[in-house]
Amino acid sequence: MPAIAYLECSRCHHHVSIETRHHASMPPSVCPQDGGALLVRYAMETLRTAVRREHAAELAARCGSSVGMWRYAEVLPDVTPVTLGEGWTPLLQSRRNAGLMIKDEGANPTGTWEARGMAMAVAMIASMAENHAAGQRGAVHLLASSRGLAAYAAAGEMKAHLFLPRDLSLPEYLGAVVHGAEVHLVDGPPGECGLRLEEEIHRRQQAAGTASTDLWMDLSPLREPFRVEGDKTLGYELVEQIGWQYPDALLYPLCDAVGLIGVWKAFEEMEALGWVSGRRPRVYVGRTATSGLAAELESMILGIVIASGGRVVAVDDGANLVSLLDWAGKEGICLSLQGAAAAALHPLLLASGEIQPGQRIVLVNTAAGLKDADTISHAMPLRRPGSLPSSLPVGGIITPV
């Protein structure tokens, strides 16, 4: 497995030693020079002579399908996985559109693409904690405004603190509390969750000089470099599943386009390793009125879109539901609202001539549709059938009758 050479700032390209990160009481989550996101860098020339793309398939053959994203151990940090079976999600062929494929990230544990990054980040933090002398480290606390953290924190025996919007759906709220996460419900616009989280991290940093040995880690997007290392496995998978070739275009929803940073990094690495060649896919990102990202994230995503020759395409919010119902009723695939926004791009781009019938197009469905059950049922509108009981009897297998 590769040795990490250093962490590199995505803005100024300043190098941060991995040793600094592993041994600091409050590890740096961003570049100390300008606050830019840190990306993991390897000695690629050494890797190029040491690994082959066939190693991934060989590892999978030895370990079976349960190896998931960890089949790419040759190009991931050397760490003991904290895994729930994430990765190697299906690439499905559309029944109606030749060449259009759906990468269904809803098949991941927790029902979202975030499982990849959370698995890697939690594994690295577990390794970091173990590297300290016995008795020198207390409990490990992980903070994020992402729903996908709770299950992985539980699997890694850590405490999750989630800052989530008050109007989040019941399935997402249940997915947090059932794994023992401490959930802070936040009023206001989407960005308010991130601000509340930053305030908490600042408070913990101010208190770092006290006698507490607890470790507090910010797992927000681009505040934990190893999330991107997990996210990048989606890029490796896409290329391998298509026969080590690039698709012609990627369709991605803006809300979850953070994963694109990892995918683009995977493309860079595979080219440096000689695993793939040719023109990278054009990236088309679907933006709705309710979608958005923090300024730094939007800047990085826009850079990728421009470099690819693609563009950001406006999608009417109402088109999401139409797209979702169309795919569910005619293809048997229940997209998330985010995935439906990306799917709505396909007919628009065909009409504009930016993509052609029969080209290899990959639609990334970033989450399971049923995670949006509250929003979808309200938009349809759909009410609970009267035949369902309003309450369930207590007893049976849970408690004595």
Image: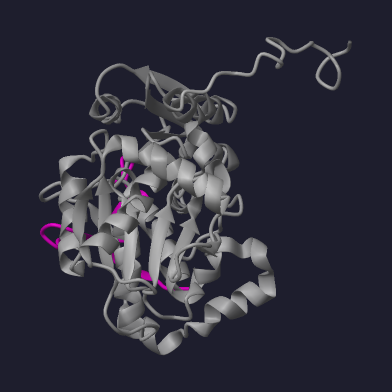
- Residue 63 at what x, y percent from top left? 67, 70
Q: Nearer the viewer, residue 142 or 168?
A: 168
Q: Is residue 113 magenta?
A: no
Would residue 187 appear left or right of 385 to someone viewing this image?
A: left
- Residue 252 at what x, y percent from top left? 33, 54
The colour mode here is: one colour
The residue lying at 47 percent from left, 82 percent from top is 53
- Residue 257 at what x, y percent from top left? 30, 50
Q: How many numbered discs, if any?
A: 0
Residue lying farthest right? 401
- Residue 270 at what x, y percent from top left? 36, 77
Would residue 277 appear left or right of 303 to someone viewing this image?
A: right
The residue lying at 56 percent from left, 61 percent from top is 90
The residue lying at 27 percent from left, 49 percent from top is 286
Q: Over which residues does the magenta segment extend?
A: 1-27
- Choose top left, top right, bottom left or bottom right for residue 154: top right
